[in-house]
Amino acid sequence: MPLDALCLSSLVGELNSALAGARIDKIYQPARDEVVLALRAPAAGNVRLLLSASPSRPRLQLTQLTRENPDTPPMFCMLLRKHLSGARLLETAQTPMERVVTLRFEALNELGDRVERCLVLEAISHRTNLLLLDGEGRILDCIRHVGLESADKCIVSGPDQTTAVRYRVLQPGMFYLLPPAVGKANPLTLEREGLERLLSAALEETRADRWLLDTLAGLSPLLCRELAYRAGGAVDITLEDLGPAGRSRLLDQLEELLQRILEARCTPTLLSLEGAPKDFTFLPITQYGEAASCREFPSFSTLLDCFYEEREHLERVRQKGQDLIRAVTRARDRTARKLGNQERELAATQDRERLRQMGDIVTSNLHTMERGMSRLRAVDFYDPEGQEIEIPLDPLLTPQQNAAKLYKEYNKAKKAEEMLTLQLEKGRRELDYLNSVLESIPLAEGERDLQEIRQELTDTGYLHRTSKARGREKRIASKPMEFRSSSGLRISVGKNNTQNDLLTCKQAFKSDIWFHTQKIHGSHVILWTEGEPPDLQSLEEAAQLAAWFSQARDSTRVPVDYTPVKYVKKPAGARPGMVVYTTYETAWVTPDGDLVKRLRANAKGTKQG
């Protein structure tokens, strides 16, 4: 995982300088394994400290990202508010070369006495946890309880130098024990001679990065590969291939890395591959060559916000909106199968004219036919060459009844074509609607947005409304995304079909400009012109937003139609989000994620101002 012990030590040093003497103002728990402390710090002002005990992204950092909180605070959040509201942060400390951070607070208890409380974050992937301890080290509560059956064994040293094995049970009332040591050497306390002895004892065929990872604590696989690459020119080079000179270079590179940590010369660096964030660390990475780009950040907190923003958002949507995704996907697949069957049935009706012709041939040959015939062989007078044709007959029917049967099948196929054409048109509209709902789910920024989509699916019959909720459920109304163009014009983007309808059909004025990707599922975008002709840059930026919040986000030269709102109409009985428009122009744009972030930051800055 990216946040190794060395990187964490740099982050802790950054937080110590920023949060010295900070007081807790408010406490939130937006997710089961995330806690946010709103702090007032003398140096940094009002800030938010995120402590994440998620197994996939454990960390602590200052964050600028807003997170939606549940209507009812979880029990762990209520306990934190009881013990830590108004508390003063005394120290942020890391257990040496471990991914364990302790935040020590001075708080007031129920009697008004000053007491010490600790928040311990264990940012270890297979045992992430967040614990609240009292002044004696006793656990008040934790996010993940660990019973005796799954407890780790710890070696505990007594005051008389004796050792004992204790089980690490994490339950309220138990004394807290640190996670068991991994049995690796601490590189910060080893001299050069000690490192050389460890290296000389390694097997020749061992890869250099694997030796670093297995021998020394606090190093991530990324750092071990980087050290091996800088020493020998390849990430998978072995100790044998390095030779004596290469091994010396390896230890030189390691000492230089450790010196960075000791002197606090760390540069928060984001590593991107093919334009997507891949990893992060505290020094430039060279092992990927030109295939990767390194971007430096002013602080680890801003780096972590950038690294985790999109993946956290998508993960929260997947977790909270899983029932919606399953329901809509199931309905979409069912509709697609139905359309496929109807298209095959419609294709079969294209031969209906031949049924009428065969009926005419049977009728013209009634005088030659007898009851009980199983086939009729006669001249096909519809064939330009006058070839004979063999027509299968039902021997249980009279010749007249066989002719009537062919005409009936012809009329049935003719009627089926009319009905199937209508059903296919209706089915395609339904499939477009369901695809638009699937596109809108990842745009949800919180539970309110997802609840609004649930309401929409319930109203359209794709989700069942429980009998208890009928007639008394509370309608949810969330807000669209807000942006501000470079020239200061407001731009709104709908996050779902309900918001699209509200923006386009209710809120926007006739002179405002409406944007939507051409024949591609996406959000409705409104450029609020305030009654004045918009500038070309604002039109371009609004078109960029329409392309970004659509199925064509990863494409280039996306066609975006735009027109005044007065030319956009909603047909009677149309599904939510479905409109028709005329008298439009088309802009061809390439979506730019950095521009989207900048325009959203413009909107936030305007609100704060």
Image: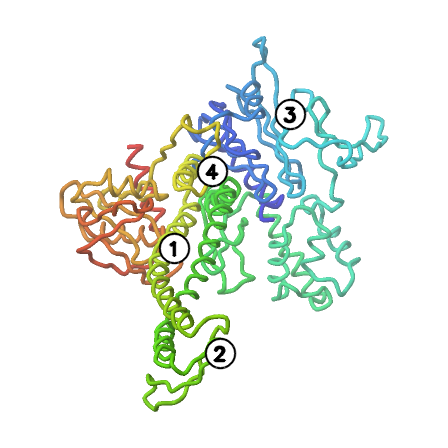
Q: Would you place residue 441 above or below residue 70 in this image?
A: below
Q: Determine the CA span between mark 2 and mark 4.
A: 56 Å
Q: Which mark is residue 127?
A: none
Disc 4 designates what residue? Answer: 464
Q: Nearer the viewer, mark 3 or mark 1?
A: 1
Q: Nearer the viewer, mark 2 or mark 4?
A: 2
Under mark 2, the amino acid is: Met
**Image coords of residue 335 (percent x, y):** 44, 54
Which of these two is toward me, 578 or 24?
578
Q: Is residue 42 left or right of residue 124?
A: left
Q: Determine the CA span between mark 1 and mark 4.
A: 21 Å
Q: Is residue 218 left or right of residue 434?
A: right
Which of these two is toward me, 34 or 19?
34
Determine whether label 2 and label 4 are within 8 Å by CB. Answer: no
Disc 2 designates what residue? Answer: 373
Q: Determine the CA span between mark 3 and mark 4.
A: 39 Å
Residue in view at x 27 percent, y 41 percent: 503
Q: Looking at the rendering, in which quadrant would you find the C terminus?
A: top left
Q: Residues within 10 Å of mark 2 (few under 14, many from 20)?
A: some
Mark earlier in primary sequence (2, 3): 3
Q: Is residue 221 visible?
A: yes
Disc 3 designates what residue? Answer: 141
Q: Determine the CA span between mark 2 and mark 3.
A: 89 Å
Tag 1 secondary structure? helix
Residue 161 appears in which quarter of the rendering? top right
Furthest toward the bottom, the residue is 385
Residue in view at x 56 percent, y 33 percent: 32
Q: Which mark is residue 427?
A: 1
